[in-house]
Amino acid sequence: MLLALVLAIAAAVVLAVMLIRRRQRFDEMTLALGRERSEWQARYDAAEHQRATFLEIINSLREGMLAIDRERRVVLVNRRFTELLQTENAIGRPLHEAVRIASVFAAFDAALEGTEWTERFSTRFGVADRRIELRAFPVPSDDIAAVALFVDVTLLERLEQIRRDFIADFSHEARTPLTAMRSAVDSFEIGAEHMSAEEDQQLRRIMSRQLRRLERLVDDLSELSRIESGDLPLERGDIDLRAMITELAEDFADRAAERSLRFVITGEPVHVFADAMRIQQTFSNLIDNAIKYGGRQSTIDIDVRSFDDHAVVRIIDHGEGIASEEKERIFRRFYRVDKSRSQEIAGTGLGLAITKHLLLIHGGTIDVESEPGHGATFVVTLPKR
């Protein structure tokens, strides 16, 4: 009986020891699993942080980005791509469903075959067209087979067109005086010893006149460049617009009389706070323009009015007028309404462009009201302060 009791106690002790050891091993396994779980959680958090950082980087790019896998499914897009091509929910979809542009398919076909591809295409954005440059290239990766970047080059192409137009316009404007000067020089070289004093003086006048025309062209271009770049300091002061315009009309009276034109000035004294020299330059250009295109045997009417916080000056001629499609273009560099008469009417074609920019830097505006055959009215608005 005692032996049985001892054996039972011994068995219980052994069982207890075994349970304790198992519990210890279980606790050790639990701790190990906890550490492993913590390590995996840390790795997951690090990977998630890395992914978020990567997405933040590609979403901050100014270029659109699209990536596909070997099955031509979209695996990655950034925010800029969605804006440029106006697509949504592209990830996971076949390329032909996410994008419906043939140029994109051709670019990715080349990239999947191991060739880089670059081309430009047009896409509609609202009511305007955008020019997009596409650059696709292969990627040696298991998850991504090819990537394409989409760059909006609309502004670059527009600037390039402006540059080409500027060179063409400048060449056109400079060709006439240069041709006249070349002709005069050739005449001197060929027959200077047989030339009369009157012919000699006439050729010298031609060269001098055309040289001044070139100088005006260069000066006006330099002036316009300074204005557009913001490198034109203003010396503001109080100006009586009515008095200034009256003085300018007196200065231009002889030129106007050559075309049987006279000035009619109406309105009231209006004071503005502006750069007197630049405002005088502005209205000189407009009055000069009115004389050139205001016809003959008529008037140039100038009206000066004061409103709450601004002044309005209207310069009205009674010439041939301006067609509606020309109204915005006349403020561009070198633009002439009637190109067939551009050689008859002296000027560099920059006066109205300079005028517009001088008014803009004063916080003012200029507009034109006109119909063909009914003259033109240039409306200038200037803030008083």
Image (cartoon, rainbow, N blue to C red):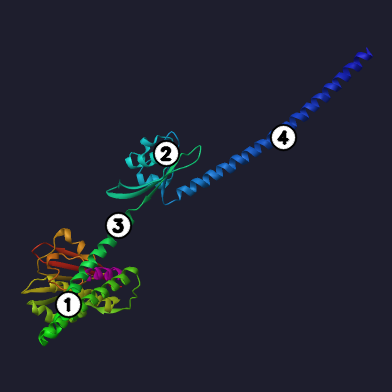
Q: Which callout, 3 or 2, points to the residue nearer the camera?
A: 2
CA distance separating discs 3 and 1 = 41 Å
CA distance separating discs 3 and 2 = 34 Å
Q: Which residue is mark 4?
A: 31
CA distance separating discs 3 and 4 = 67 Å
Q: Earlier in the sequence, mark 1 or mark 4?
A: 4
Q: Earlier in the sequence, mark 3 or mark 1?
A: 3
Q: Earlier in the sequence, mark 2 or mark 4?
A: 4
Q: Which residue is mark 2?
A: 113
Q: Secondary structure at mark 2?
A: loop
Q: Position of residue 142 (x, y in %)?
A: 51, 37
Q: Secondary structure at mark 1?
A: helix
Label 2: how many Cα within 10 Å (few below 14, some 14–19, many 20+): few
Q: Quadrant of residue 111?
A: top left
Q: Residue at x 19, y 75 (%)?
A: 182
Q: Which mark is residue 158?
A: 3
Q: Residue furthest top?
A: 1
Q: Are marks 1 and 4 in contact (CB under 8 Å)?
A: no
CA distance separating discs 2 and 4 = 52 Å
Position of residue 25 relative to residue 245, above or below, is above
Amino acid type shown at disc 2:
Glu
Magenta region includes residue 358: yes
Q: Residue at x 29, y 76 (%)?
A: 274
Amino acid type shown at disc 1:
Asp
Q: Which residue is mark 1?
A: 186
